[in-house]
Image (cartoon, helix red, strand yellow):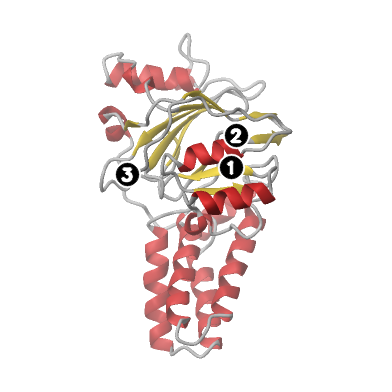
Amino acid sequence: MMPHNEEQVTLRTSQSSALPCVVAAARRGWALFPLRTRTKRPARGFTDWERHATDEEDTLIAHWRRYPDHNVAIATGPSGLIVIDLDVPKNGEEPPPEWGQSGVTNGLDVLSALAENHAGGSTDWLATFTVRTRRGGQHLYYASPEGAAYRNTAGKLGWLVDTRATGGYVVGPGSYVTDADGSGTYEVTNPAPVAPLPNWLATLLAPARRRPVTSGQVHQNLATRPGMAAYTTRALRGEIDRVLTAKKGQRNHTLNQAAFAVGTLVGAGMLPQHMAQDQLTHAALHIGLEADEVEATVHSGLQAGIRRPRGVAA
């Protein structure tokens, strides 16, 4: 990871470029990619964002000079990060019974209560790079332990506390998001070095063994997440097109890459495995690959991708 300057990066308004924040993040060694203007969605051509994310300054500068209004995303896995997303309740939202005790009103309160129980009330976990999110929540950035395989979580730690790790991304500082539940900037509030993931959090976030996602679960996931079905369709179509247009001599390698990318969708519960396998197999046979070769490549690529489920933005 490259050294970084400790100065506060320029904060973005709805009219200014995110470029200074992009450069500051890249100099920390973080892998970035663009989001559409004022949204959390990957820019056109970046559906396979984990593969496209980069910390190459010249590439990033060229992009944001051409598209200064694009928001910024940080791919947490390639960046070696685990980001704790501490949200605030939406209008009228009340804490569930298990978090209804006096004083718990948001994600920060929940994590503080966990620290009280598991870290003796220590506040050392707050001493890390921190970003204020658009609705007043916080992103706490931690360095992933060497060799760890942490995934994204939603509510595993408690009410209004999510995490982004391998297979996920967060909206980065310098971004401005407009949404129905609130608009605003993502601003650095503590430019400190990224701290190691505290041991007590590492224990609470220890990955559990994944069970295969059923077609019913996929349907429920897509039904409750507006826009995700369209995103999944575009991503799948893009990978199938990549296989269909692969050059001779690169077809099996391309198929493996596409199967991995599609597998991340399967692992995230966004696509049934049988549909992914059928689509990839049909495309590979269409371009002339042998059936035995196709079966082995699709299986290995999908399984690798399933183990690294694709995440959504925080």
Q: Residue at 60% of width from left, 68% of height from top? A: 238
Reading the chain from its start, which is encountered first: label 1 or label 3?
1
Q: Quadrant of residue 123?
A: top left
Horizontal side, residue 29 vs residue 13: left or right: left
Residue with the mark numbered 3: 207
Depth check, front residue: 35 or 154: 35
**x and y percent of residue 256 in the render?**
43, 73
Q: Give SS at disc 1.
A: strand
Q: Residues within 10 Å of mark 3 (few under 14, many from 20)?
A: some
User: Cα distance, mark 3 to mark 2?
Assistant: 31 Å
Q: Is mark 2 on a helix, strand or loop?
A: loop
Residue type pointed to by label 3: Pro
Where residue 61 sits in the image (x, y, percent)?
58, 48
Residue 285, position in %: x, y? Answer: 51, 86
According to the image, label 1 marks what residue?
Answer: 72
Residue at 48% in and 55% down: 50
- SS at badge 3: loop
| Residue nearer the viewer, 61 or 38 | 61
- For disc 2, the marked residue is 174
Q: Where is residue 302 in the image (x, y as percent from the top left)?
A: 42, 67
The residue type indicated by label 1 comes to: Val
Task: Report the quarter where the C terminus lies.
Answer: top right
- Badge 2: few (under 14), some or many (20 or more) residues near its Cα, within 10 Å? many
Mark 1 or 3, closer to the camera? 1
Q: Is residue 42 visible?
A: no
Q: Compared to 70, does 268 lie above or below? A: below
